[in-house]
Image (cartoon, rainbow, N blue to C red):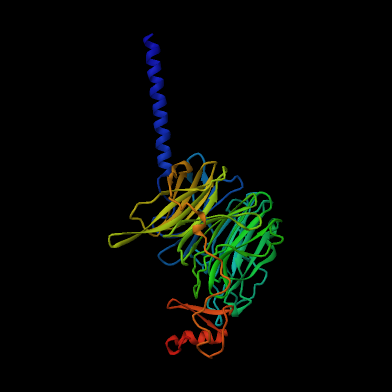
Amino acid sequence: MRKNILLYFFGIALIQSCNSNTQLKEEQASAPVLLSSQNQKASCAYLTSDEKNDPVISWCETDSAGKKYFFISYFNKVSQRLGDAIPVPVEQNASIHEEGMPKVAIKGDGSIIAVWETSSPTKENEWAGFVHYIQSFDKGKTWTQPLCVHADTSAGGSRSFASIARLSNGEVGVCWLDASTDYKKNGRPVKFASTEGNKGFRHEVLIEPVACECCRTAISSDGNGNISAVFRAIINDSIRDISISTSADNGKTFGKAASFSNDNWVINGCPHNGPCVANNNGISYTTWYTGGARKGIYYEELNKENKAIIKRQVSPDGKNIQLCVLDDGARMIAYNETIHEADSFYSRIIISKVEGDKIFSKNITSEKAHAFYPVVCSYEKDKIIVAWSEGGKVFYRLISADAVNNAIALPSNPHDYRIAAATGIKLTNHTDPVCGMHVDSDVQDTIHIDNKIIGFCSKYCKEKFLQSPGVYEVE
């Protein structure tokens, strides 16, 4: 009898010990983990998944001499940690910045595609460059030589801001901003191409002839041949809203782009803060930042006809938003949010979860953090891995979706978030301040200055005004 009692208590103790170890492992897994080197400056974390849908991360480092490094790491399911860094032979003229960061995608057969933009300035164009890619067919042991994603390889054109994703047929698709074909609108075309076996990228397709020239693009593919491509559009020359174009045939053709954010953000320049998209069964889940009248970051769902189903403001103080979709359909969003405490400003990483018409959130960094540019990827059925830049280093955390449980208060009327689409710009002036010619609301050349929207008859008059705006009288 005594022996049975001892065995019983021993069993209880063993179970408690196992539970304690499991809990400790989960706590350790959810704590921030330093991914990058202690001795080098790191940035540009990017998350994707391999052919088994396990997380893969890439990031960049720079040493004290300015040499650039590019790494990838596969997630280890046993240790619940990212594995050893695998070096990728990046070119030294590669552009290292978060909006156009180097990225990787894993094809259905396990081969790796790495993509980055290069800086190759000319006398005529200081922003000229190419979008290059390399391939590895042995898990990163050897790599091919760099080639251009785009068909036109002539020097002097600006090509950048590429996004990349695995397609439903196991190939990889890439979307980027190509060299400008319309100087009048100051925009650049959005193009798409996909890989063909080991031959690299082929089948270049034009998605949109004119888009905002320096915001990242984003693409996503579901398992049924549907691709969603989102980008910041130029509307009436100065409005920088978000547009979407979709394909139902794995990128062979794309439909006409549709502007859907309706922010009416008028800015004479580029926001340098692009959108994100996740595609699931023909539904496009999108996120973006706007500095318009209702500043902040937003979430919107679009049906197969690219019509809005629901729109929500996630945060009025957030930027650099990313999202992914879990197996159960929940959308997980990551962004950095600015907070003001005493006389100081901080930036923390927030995770939000969208379930139906509800949004929940969780802060995963300290209140006094200076953390930016988060990226997020789903893992298993109910987890995400999040990575970000902080203090010149890259960190990551593994988070359970159930832990994101603080409800965000939302307006009772979802239409409160909607901003009416512009039918034309309301100009401050009726005549061109430079030449005196009459201008209408549909002019192509405008600027936003001193809370005024000023229209011009031509690009020449606009540029002349900007040289000495105080000289001209606006009527």
- Residue that protrudes farthest toward the top in the picture: 1
Q: Is residue 197 above or below residue 180?
A: above
- Residue 185: in sight, yes or no? yes
Quadrant for residue 181, please give it.
bottom right
Which residue is situated farthest in the left direction here?
342
The residue sitting at 66% across, 57% down in the picture is: 305
Q: Between residues 270 and 471, which one lies in front from this camera angle?
A: 471
Q: Quadrant of residue 63?
A: bottom left
Closer to the camera in the image, 156 or 341:
341
Q: Position of residue 54 (x, y in %)?
A: 56, 45
**Where's the N terminus, which quadrant?**
top left
Please tell me which residue is depicted at 43% across the width and 90% down the height of the picture: 471
- Give the number of marks: 0
x, y (%) of residue 291? 46, 66
Image-based side of 105 in relation to 370, left or right: right
Residue 60 is at least partly visible in this image: no
Residue 311 at what x, y percent from top left?
A: 53, 56
Question: Is 364 drawn above or below residue 175 in the view shown?
Answer: above
Point out residue 261 in the picture as x, y percentages from the top left corner. Answer: 55, 62
